[in-house]
Image: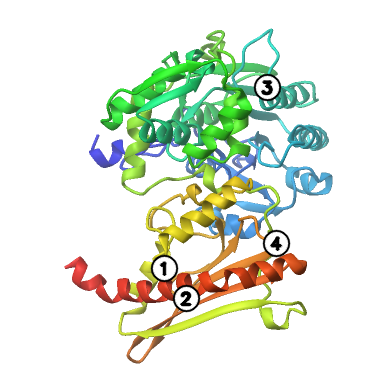
Amino acid sequence: MSEEADASDSTPLLSSPLGTEDALRAVPGEDGRAPLVLVLGATGYIGGRLVPRLLAGGYRVRTLTRSGARVAALPWADDVDVVEGDAADADAMDRAMDDVDLVYYLVHSMHSGRDYGRLDRAIALTVAKAAAAHGVGRIVYLSGLHPEGVELSAHLASRQEVGDILIASATPTLVLQAGVVIGSGSASFEMIRHLTEVLPYMPAPRWVRNLIQPIAVRDVVYYLLAAARAEGDLNREYDIGGPDVMRYSEMMNGYAEVAGLPRRGITALPVLTPSLASHWVGLVTPVPRQIARPLVESLLHSCVVKDDAIDGLIPPPPEGLTGYRDAVRLALGRIEIDQVETSWVDARVTGAPSDPMPSDPEWAGRTVFQDARRRPTTADPDEVWRVIAQIGGATGWYSASVLWATRGLLDRVMGGVGAQRGRRTLAQVTEGDAIDVWRVERVEPGRLLRLRAEMRVPGKAWLELGVDPTADGSEYWQRAVFFPRGLTGRLYWLSMLPFHGLVFSGMVNRIVAEAEHAPADDA
């Protein structure tokens, strides 16, 4: 296989995609039509990888999503049936289940605040009722690997409860229980990557000594695809895992070996509680505390595959399960060529505003503050857009990097996502993507990038960056828009004005300069 093909952590780039193998392809029904599959969580980390492979395998696919615009921005959007609505809403679920043969349940509410267990329960009950009413043939649920006979963390207990609800329903349910998923863009992988790269010596919680069985994302997708073809009215749980059983500390040093880093010294300390450990992870890695804590709690006990029952139902992939170090190597290759297919950073942020910016803020009927700037340039519009599309993440914000970093740190301290979240890729931008403390609300390629703030601010904020062609080249423009909330919001904007003058003027100058010098640099 070529080096480029090896770079993929989900499926080789230059060979037949996963899902096209005869053993994984859709089997037409008695009417000759391909099965209709409903994917719940299609825009998530696993769902976003499963959908295109279901399509490649000949399935008809439907998604239920809160944001049709988010799905519309994905490369497979035109090939799926989209139903807009919330998974907890019975009417929306009823519409989504119509004529469905198989349901993939890939949603969980870990990002929805402290009461995510109640929401998970409500969604599971809604799915179970709708599936039974529409005569769905099977539900496939991806849950978490966990030990028996111990008190589970809230996160794993919620996952287990959802599985129990679905198994007890009238629809046969196949539950796949996976441990730590290793792949480019997974939160678990990013925790390992940043902890190992940032800290040469690490005081760590006691759970670094626990045994776990990681699994490559490509193998998770394989099992999910194969579950659609598994024979019989199955209604039980199956553990799935990779070939390696190891301690978390061994995973970190395994990463160091693959990444060419020195071996890390790790000391287990009994005083680091899950809460303290999640704060520590939140400071050192881009994974925010609200995501880190459930992941940390899931590591409090050894979690390994309890039996090989899955092999009697679904044989391992023809090329074998992916070893841990190979999974790391493939994930790093994906990152290196800027082809991260899905990422945890694009997950929805609890409490963040989701309503779009008014089409004309000045006529929105509310107090609004704006900072608008323009600058003509001899640069071609395409070059200006190339610079705009790379903003944030590793590229930065083209001005006052210390101020941007300080604002991101303050947001992290206040419980927000912080600037460490970065972005999924270096140069590709689609609606719904996260870019540091912003969410991409709208993209008009070659013309407009609109970002909605997800940082903690007393109001709602947007940042627009755009380019218009002119006779002499183009004109770059940008606009910050802020709708304050009460007196606090107004005082916040006024206090930021001195920094805006530095930050926003610097952005204009640097973006234009980058675009004008691009041809010479490329030469």
Q: Amino acid at mark 1?
A: Ile
Whole-percent x, y for residue 289 in the image = 59, 38
Q: Do the numbered discs 2 and 1 sit on residues whose CB atoms are within 8 Å?
A: yes
Q: Do the numbered discs 3 and 4 sit on residues whose CB atoms are within 8 Å?
A: no
Counting residues from the start of the chain, the first of labels 2 and 1 encountered is 1
Q: Look at discs 4 and 2 and give the one toward the viewer.
A: 4
Q: Amino acid at mark 4?
A: Pro
Dot 1, crowdedness within 10 Å: few (<14), some or many (≥20)?
Answer: many
Whole-percent x, y for residue 48 in the image = 53, 44
Q: Amino acid at mark 2?
A: Gly
Identify the secondary structure beneath mark 3: loop
Q: CA distance from mark 2 to mark 1?
A: 8 Å
Whole-percent x, y for residue 208 in the image = 48, 18
Q: Amino acid at mark 3?
A: Ser
Disc 4 marks which residue?
Answer: 458
Q: Do the numbered discs 2 and 3 sit on residues whose CB atoms are within 8 Å?
A: no
Q: Please indicate whether residue 395 sits to the left or right of residue 486 in the image.
A: left
Whole-percent x, y for residue 132 in the image = 80, 32
- Residue visible at 54% across and 40% down in the picture: 45
Q: CA distance from mark 3 to mark 4?
A: 34 Å
Q: CA distance from mark 4 to mark 2?
A: 26 Å
Quarter location, residue 385: bottom left
Disc 2 marks which residue?
Answer: 466
Counting residues from the start of the chain, the first of labels 3 and 4 encountered is 3
Residue 406 lies, with reference to residue 505, above or below; the image says above
Q: CA distance from mark 2 to mark 3?
A: 46 Å
Disc 3 marks which residue?
Answer: 153
Quarter location, residue 41: top right
Which residue is more in the foreground, 384 or 273? Answer: 273
Disc 1 marks which residue?
Answer: 388
